[in-house]
Amino acid sequence: MDVIALSWWQLAAAALLVIALAGCTAWARLGMSQNLLVAAARTVIQLALVGLVLEALFAAAELYWVALMAFAMLLIAGREVMARQKRRLLGGWAFGIGTLSMFLSSFTVAVLTLTLIIGPEPWYRPQYAIPLLGMMLGNTMTGVALALDRLTDTAWRQRGVIENRLMLGQRWQEAIGDIRREAMRSGLMPVINAMAAAGVVSLPGMMTGQILAGSPPALAVKYQILIMFTITLGTGFGTLAAVAAGSRRLFDSRERLRLDRLSAPG
Amino acid sequence: MSHADPLRLERLAIGELAEVDLTLAPGEILCLSGASGSGKSRLLRAIADLEPHDGEAWLGDRAQSAIPGHAWRRAVMLVPAESHWWAERVGEHFHDPEEADLQALGFERDVLDWSVARLSSGEKQRLALLRAVSREPAALLLDEPTANLDDATAHQVEAWLVARIREHGLPVVWVAHDIAQIRRVADRHCRIKGGTLETEKEGAWT
């Protein structure tokens, strides 16, 4: 079954409707029309550019181009993780911990999934590698950012409790244990919720896309389950690594709580 | 845990405070006073190794820098002016406190089932002292241990503390403002003035 081709004029028809929506909100003085149009324009431009990049990448299909693309995605995700934290670790640690934990989890799981489970030829075939990594990085990024933000912000607000526990002779792991658990929880909640609601409340985007593109639903479902699991693995291990490294960094070698290693919110 | 070790500070310096050299014999209570903001609490935090500082502290022959932070603080225990409680029930913060200690501080055993949220500031302060002492530290650093208590309770708590300190031979740094209390409990009295620690003359306060 072939995909029905979409031409630019068909997209233009959809774009006209978005402009009409913007017109309506402007007419009703709801003040959202400008944001709406800017966001719509960004979608078109960003996706068109990424389409060009992917076309080139698929045509080349060289390992180093795929790796370059993967690292560019990783660095952008690392920057995003850092930007989403209210009180971040100073001295490059916020970026470093976020990026490294995403690298360890997402890249390992992506490579394992490609080589052991899906098995395209060659294993780094960009049609498989890039979308898989993109979906994993996007979700891992959310988990790591939520967990690190919760960790540093809660440690700052509960510094009295942490220090009092240290004064009583507890190890640093014990003194921050509750906060670590909370941080893990907030990092993992989105993927757990997504798995629990999949297919019942929401039809996942990738599966919908595959079905629209002509895949039999049974195959699309299998891919979706695989993707859900890899996302969970990536997010879980990424969050685990980020919380472990981040909480360690909040204490020094004498097990003192060092909130001077966090930036002021801003 | 070897009790009855002296606590010795060797060129210990933190913040504005000049280097402190002090030796506290087992069972000796040193009262520390000074204007607020003069660095009393920070000195205690340095002795407990909760903040980066210069110099060294010794408990008997164990150097602060030679043992892990938690082990040092387990032995040289700081009770801060404001205590913090992390679990739901009072009892979850204790390792099996002695009945006699609870009673000496004016509590029945059922206090261990109380919710932390219902504790008054005075109750928190007394329980925080018991929480620390019941862990059997080898030295105590007390930051205004009776600040939130009425006179009668303060006397009661003070007497209990002094008895435990003498019984276990703990060297103690006790931050206090009340000169009457200092007269009652101190073996020695130091005051922080202009960034240095000065020992008060014996006659001036006994």
Image: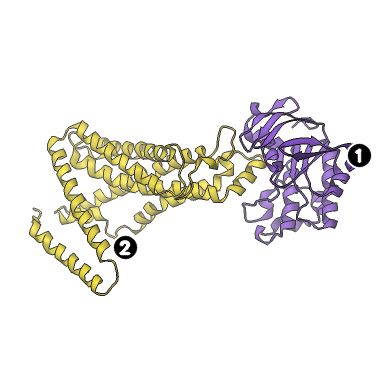
Classify the position of the N terminus of chain B by image quarter. Answer: top right
Mark carried by residue B203: 1
Residue type highlighted by circle 2: Val
Q: Residue furthest bottom?
A: A28
User: What color was chain A assigned in the picture?
Assistant: yellow
| Display coloring | by chain
Residue A84 is left or right of residue B126, and the answer is left
| Quadrant in which residue B173 is drawn | top right
Q: Nearer the viewer, residue A83 or A102?
A: A83
The amino acid sitting under disc 1 is Gly
Q: Secondary structure at mark 2?
A: loop
Question: Mark 2, residues whose alpha carbon is within 10 Å: few (<14), some, or many (≥20)?
Answer: few
Percent coordinates x, y for residue A234 in the rendering: 35, 43
Which chain's residue wears label 2?
Answer: A
In the rendered picture, chain B carries what hue?
purple
Looking at the image, residue B16 sits to the left or right of residue A131; the answer is right
Residue A193 placement (x, y as % from top left): 38, 56
| Residue at image point 33% right, 36% down | A108
Question: Is residue B170 at all visible to an observer of this figure?
Answer: no
Query: SS for tag 1?
Result: helix
Q: Circle 2 is placed at which residue position?
A: A201
